[in-house]
């Protein structure tokens, strides 16, 4: 899911991030590409419009365009807007009512409603220690009630005994009585599906809701059906007071638009994502993680946040100015090293930057760890101010003195000098790209 959308967006943002300065036009051009990518991923048009408007307005703000890393800021704005579009935070089931708390499952036939009912029953029992009862009200589809009984057996959750000939409202009443008698915490009602949304179905759901007062009414939709899923959700939302959505088949390779539009269209949170046929293939829906995955950004958001907190803006600007002039001496290297330390060291940086896994493995293989940062700092500290400003002064004799002063070997001093030379060269090449991108480029080598 989301793969092609993610590829497209990563392309757009890589280009943005690759530039040091951004103009309003750059941002607008990027947003046009984002708009097309979202539409091609099947996200509903009004949702796309609202999204692009909100993001563009923020992204062309002066604070962003004038910042040290405008590209990164824009990506973060898009990320945050995506999280918002997906519902903000994680939304747990609301079970705060007198037991038995009723959860009514609704949706079209084949959406994965019965499977999801059993999955949620299992979750509640195993993760929350709830006493759960499940009942199928589906009298249309042959063997629907038996299907739930079989799944119940597999997950170890009780199901209401089947009484042939009973109608949905009767079954619901019987389930509530049984749940009360058995001191059940949560009663899951699996309502009948239909092939299409029709009035009879809606009437039936309303009648069941009237006798069972569900605390949660979860709409199950198949994310593979794209725009159809959105239309179905809209019809249901207009008829019954939904409290949340369960998106199934998130393991498939759909373009993802349904998932992205669902919250905006129904106004209800996506509570679960189902990711397979197995009965434990369901998880709470985390907007944050999904957005990061869509943007193919590893955990770059927390990296930007950390960087903003760790890097003194003045320091970074001073460095950027010097780099712009092609200047990069040992003092600058020291500033960079200290910033890296403050951001959590090499490992933390490597883990957060997309595409940095390889660099991290290489560092581990060469025995390079965070002590290296401290050692390098010590070596620079052992140089005279003149040597720091003009590293080419460091002849053999001076290197021996510097090494001694830092408690290191001459070869360590040589390594540092070599690294400085490489970085100074790299800085010249990438000086237009801004600080963070610079770091990534250096360590990605
Ligand atoms: P219902 O008619 O809505 O009750 O749908 P079912 O629960 O019977 O599911 C229909 C089919 O979809 C079954 O074969 C399920 O195993 C399958 N299914 C349900 N959820 C998922 C899912 O998240 N991923 C995949 N790949 N298959 C699923």
Image (cartoon, rainbow, N blue to C red):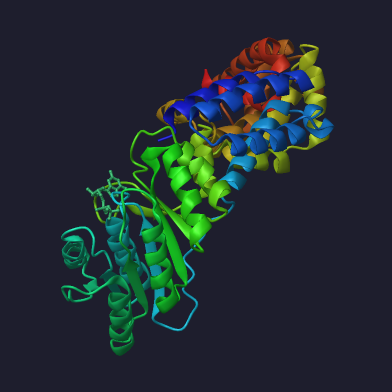
In depth, the one of 331 and 147 nearer the eye is: 147
Residue 314 location in percent, x, y?
83, 33
Q: How many marks?
A: 0
Image position of 77 (left or right of 357): right
- Residue at 34%, 44% (x, y): give it: 249
Tell me which corner region of the image, top left, top right, bottom left or bottom right, holds residue 322.
top right
- Note whether 294 is above or below 287 in the view shown: above
Q: Is residue 119 above or below residue 37?
A: below
396 versus 204 height, above or below: above
Residue at 23%, 65% in the rendered image: 139
Q: Looking at this rendering, what residue extends furthest in the bottom direction?
A: 181
Does residue 379 appear in this view? Answer: yes
Of residues 389 and 423, the one drawn nearer to the viewer in this rendering? 423
In percent of the image, x 40 and y 35: which residue is there? 1
Residue 145: horizontal and vertical position, in percent?
20, 65
Kindly indicate the quadrant of the structure image that contains residue 218.
Answer: bottom left
From this view, report whether residue 445 is shown above or below residue 183.
above
* Residue 114 at x, y percent in the picture: 28, 58
In screen coordinates, is 180 left or right of 19?
A: left
């Amino acid at each position: 899911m989301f793969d092609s959308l993610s590829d497209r967006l990563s392309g757009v943002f890589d280009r943005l991030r690759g530039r040091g300065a951004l103009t309003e036009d750059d941002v607008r051009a990027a947003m046009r590409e984002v708009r097309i990518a979202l539409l091609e991923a099947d996200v509903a048009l009004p949702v796309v419009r609202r999204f692009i408007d909100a993001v563009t307005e923020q992204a062309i703000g002066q604070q962003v365009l004038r910042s040290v890393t405008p590209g990164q800021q824009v990506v973060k704005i898009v990320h945050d807007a995506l999280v918002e579009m997906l519902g903000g935070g994680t939304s747990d089931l609301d079970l705060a009512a007198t037991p038995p708390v009723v959860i009514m499952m609704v949706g079209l036939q084949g959406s994965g409603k019965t499977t999801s009912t059993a999955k949620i029953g299992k979750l509640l029992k195993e993760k929350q220690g709830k006493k759960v009862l499940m009942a199928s009200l589906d009298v249309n589809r042959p063997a629907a009630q038996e299907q739930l009984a079989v799944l119940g057996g597999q997950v170890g959750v009780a199901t209401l005994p089947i009484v042939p000939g009973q109608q949905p409202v009767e079954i619901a009443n019987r389930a509530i009585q049984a749940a009360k008698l058995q001191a059940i915490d949560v009663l899951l009602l699996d309502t009948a599906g239909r092939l299409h949304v029709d009035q009879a179905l809606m009437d039936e759901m309303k009648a069941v809701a009237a006798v069972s007062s569900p605390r949660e009414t979860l709409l199950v939709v198949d994310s593979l059906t794209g725009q159809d899923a959105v239309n179905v959700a809209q019809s249901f939302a207009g008829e019954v007071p939904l409290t949340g959505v369960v998106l199934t088949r998130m393991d498939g390779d759909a373009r993802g638009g349904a998932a992205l539009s669902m919250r905006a269209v129904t106004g209800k949170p996506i509570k679960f994502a189902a990711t397979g046929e197995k009965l434990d293939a369901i998880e709470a829906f985390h907007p944050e993680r999904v957005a990061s995955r869509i943007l193919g950004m590893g955990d770059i958001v927390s990296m930007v946040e950390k960087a903003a907190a760790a890097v003194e803006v003045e320091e970074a600007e001073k460095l950027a100015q010097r780099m712009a002039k092609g200047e990069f001496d040992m003092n600058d290297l020291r500033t960079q090293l200290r910033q890296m330390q403050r951001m959590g060291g090499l490992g933390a940086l490597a883990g957060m930057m997309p595409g940095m896994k390889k660099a991290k493995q290489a560092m581990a293989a060469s025995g390079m760890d965070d002590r290296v940062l401290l050692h390098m700092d010590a070596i620079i500290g052992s140089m005279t101010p003149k040597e720091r400003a003009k590293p080419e002064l460091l002849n053999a004799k001076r290197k021996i003195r510097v090494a001694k002063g830092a408690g290191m070997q001459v070869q360590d001093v040589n390594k540092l000098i070599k690294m400085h030379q490489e970085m100074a060269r790299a800085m010249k090449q990438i000086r237009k790209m801004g600080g963070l991108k610079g770091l990534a480029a250096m360590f990605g080598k």
